Image (cartoon, helix red, strand yellow):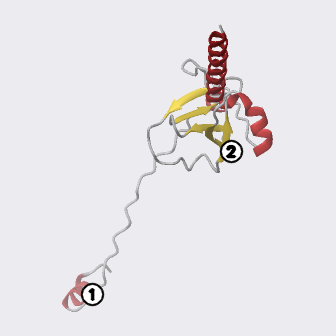
Amino acid sequence: MLAGVYTGRILSILLFFNVACISNRAKEQHQYYYYPQKNVYYDPVKKNFWYSLNGARSWNKFSDSNAVEPVALGAKVLISSTDSEVYKNNESHRKLYSGALLAINVTDTTGASPGPEVAGRTVVQKKKITARKKPVEQKPKKGLGKFINKIFGKH
């Protein structure tokens, strides 16, 4: 009976140790890059970008297997997070790193009518320009031609 008590304690210690290891694995820190100028996150392990175009109300994922670091996103900040959805803390990241909040109102523009600056345009007919021929200048005659012109020319 004493052996059963020790076995039970050993099993409960092993079970506690196993649960502790699982919870430590769940709280493992992941490294992300945050680009405050564009409010974009990058997971260098999974090669995923997370971005929002509607004021951080929803987030979109873009996967890029290209190994080139994006220069157009500006300076980056290294962020450690236990959450795989790092963008859930976007408000605090924007405040901490002076991040920009992008809110681009995009709707389907396939049936959109042109704005007043475009609709009010009219085509102005340009006058047709014709090239005028320059009068041909007669070269002054020399020699025998000049002599004949003086004798038989217009008087």
Q: Nearer the viewer, residue 140 or 78?
A: 78
- On the question of residue 39 being in view, the answer is no
Which residue, as the protein is rendered here, is positioned at the far front?
A: 2
Quadrant (top left, top right, bottom left, bottom right) of the N terminus:
top right
Q: Nearer the viewer, residue 29 or 62?
A: 29
Q: Is residue 90 above or below residue 72?
A: above
- On the question of residue 95 being in view, the answer is yes
User: At 56% from the left edge and 38% from the top edge, which residue is drawn?
Assistant: 124
Q: CA distance from mark 2 to mark 1?
A: 88 Å
Q: Position of residue 56 (x, y in %)?
A: 71, 28
Between tags 2 and 1, which lies in front?
A: 2
Q: Is residue 12 above or below residue 34?
A: above
Q: Position of residue 28 (x, y in %)?
A: 63, 33
Which residue, as the protein is rendered here, is positioned at the far bottom?
A: 143
User: At 19% from the left edge and 90% from the top edge, which residue is drawn?
Assistant: 144
Q: Position of residue 26 (x, y in %)?
A: 63, 26
Name the N-terminal-most of marks 2 and 1.
2
Judge from the rendering whether residue 58 lies leftward or rightward of residue 149; answer left or right: right
Cβ–Cβ under 8 Å for marks 2 and 1: no
Residue identifier under label 2: 37
Crowdedness of circle 2 by 10 Å Cα count: few (<14), some, many (20+)?
A: some
Judge from the rendering whether residue 55 lies leftward or rightward of residue 44; answer left or right: right
Q: Nearer the viewer, residue 33 or 40?
A: 33
Q: Disc number at residue 150?
A: 1
Q: Position of residue 52 (x, y in %)?
A: 65, 30
- Report which quarter residue 17 is drawn in: top right
Which residue, as the protein is rendered here, is positioned at the far left?
A: 144
Disc 1 element:
helix
Q: Amino acid at mark 2?
A: Gln
